[in-house]
Image (cartoon, helix red, strand yellow):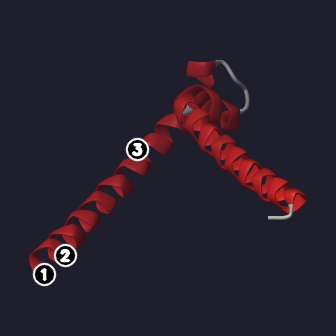
Amino acid sequence: MYICIAAFFASLVFSLNAIHLGERDIASYYLRNGARDTGSPNIVNSIVWDFRSYDTLGEETVLFTAALGVFLVAERRSSKRKEGV
């Protein structure tokens, strides 16, 4: 059990270190080449809509699904109250 916990934390430390090192390279690439690669004068829009469009689409899907779930739960509770249950 302790070996699994130690392995988990070791892999977490190594993966966070790798992610941190990669962020500097990706961020500098976006800043240097964003306007040229996308043709957008706004660097934020070029990153969100061109470089990370699938990620943005995934985030919007999660938000839409969560909002739909909240609406359905609220609607179900509302209909139960009307029935007197």
Q: Amino acid at mark 3?
A: Asp
Q: CA distance from mark 1 to mark 2?
A: 5 Å
Spatial distance from mark 1 to mark 3, Cα to Cα? 35 Å
> Which of pointers 1 and 3 indicates the residue nearer the eye?
1
Mark before the other along the chain sequence, 1 or 3: 1
Q: Could you say whether the residue bearing mark 2 is in a helix, strand or loop?
A: helix
Disc 1 marks which residue? 2
> Where does residue 68 sit, x and y in percent of width and height?
71, 44
Amino acid type, residue under disc 2 in the picture: Ile
**Between 52 and 67, the one nearer to me in the picture:** 67
Q: Which quarter of the image is occupied by the N terminus?
A: bottom left
Q: Is residue 6 left or right of residue 32?
A: left
- Crowd band around label 3 with a 10 angstrom C-alpha radius: few (<14), some (14–19), many (20+): few
Residue at coordinates 66% horizontally, 46% vertically from top-left? 63
| Dot placed on the residue nearer the N-terminal end, 3 or 2 | 2
Quadrant of the image for the C terminus?
bottom right
Do the CB atoms of the residues marked 3 and 2 lie less than 8 Å apart? no
Q: Which residue is mark 3?
A: 25
Q: Residue furthest bottom?
A: 2
**Disc on res. 5:** 2
Give the Cα separation between the discs numbered 3 and 2.
31 Å
Query: What residue is rendered at 78% in x and 56% in y?
Result: 74
Q: Is residue 4 above or below residue 84?
A: below
25 relative to 68 in the view: left or right: left
Q: Residue furthest front?
A: 84
